Amino acid sequence: MTTVGLLYPGHSAEDDYPRLEVLLDSDIRLPVVHTDIGEDAHRVDALLRMGAADRLAARVEQLRLEGAESVVWACTSGSFVYGWEGAHEQIRSLALAAGMPASSTSFGFAHALRELGAQRVAVAATYPEDITALFTAFLKASGAEVVADRASGIVTAAEVGTWGRDEVLELARAGDHPDAEVVLLPDTALHTAAYLADLEQAVGKPVLTANQVTVWEGLRLAERRAWVYGPKLGKLFEKEFEPPEQSGHPE
């Protein structure tokens, strides 16, 4: 059994995590503990308060009781808003408070890109333009080349959480760019777990979504590899099918 603890702000798309747990179809548990979202706004001051060290530390005891082996701050904007160095300090503080390895969704994106061997990315964001620009700056600091970024201008996580399959696929298509090796959908308030295969089919390349990379990052910290056959969890989790060895005897 591997347990990855997730700290999630408020209530928007947290039901992606039990869905991902089922799709992984293994002994992996993904308990979600909700942090105080404060003001639901994709605005710098609100996001800085949302990701404050004391707010995160206040909920880690519940994850310890769940038997978590790693913890991920499941919020992209509430981590990259601190900048590259500030986001590192945020997870250092979280790791000390939790007594276990810690990371955030923003670093999940950076590490997942390295896993895929990709550098050129397109960002398809739900955020306003200024918040999207902070994410692209974070990605550039990680070594990625952002060839395109699209901001949808949505202010609240609550609104993002109402989007369904059609809106999510259109976001990915609109944000894609011919030079991009991967398309990134960075908001953990966006439901994507049910659409990962559809997203990659729609753009014809790997797609990384916030809730997907959050789980992958937690498993990476716990030193647990999780592979699935087929595209249901996207290229990041896909294990290529290896046919059984032939016996050499005719059927």
Image (cartoon, grey):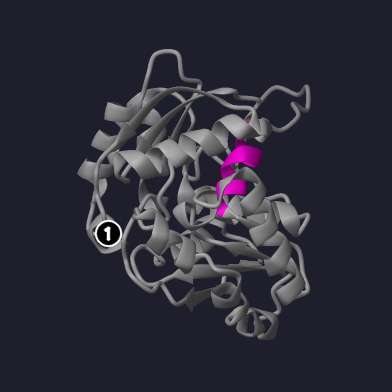
Residue 193 image point, x, y percent: 41, 52
Q: Quadrant of the N terminus?
A: bottom right
Decide which of 124, 128 is in the foreground and name it.
128
Disc 1 element: loop
| Vertical side of 77 occupied by 70: above or below | below
Confirm whether residue 235 shows in the render.
no
Amino acid marked by disc 1:
Thr
Residue 218 image point, x, y percent: 65, 58
Q: Which residue is mark 1?
A: 156
| Vertical side of 14 occupied by 89: above or below | above
In the image, the segment drawn in magenta is 105-113
Does the magenta-highlighted stretch encompass residue 9? no
Does the magenta-highlighted stretch encompass residue 108? yes
What secondary structure is the stretch in magenta mostly built from?
helix
Confirm whether residue 120 shows in the render.
yes
Q: Quadrant of the C terminus?
A: top right
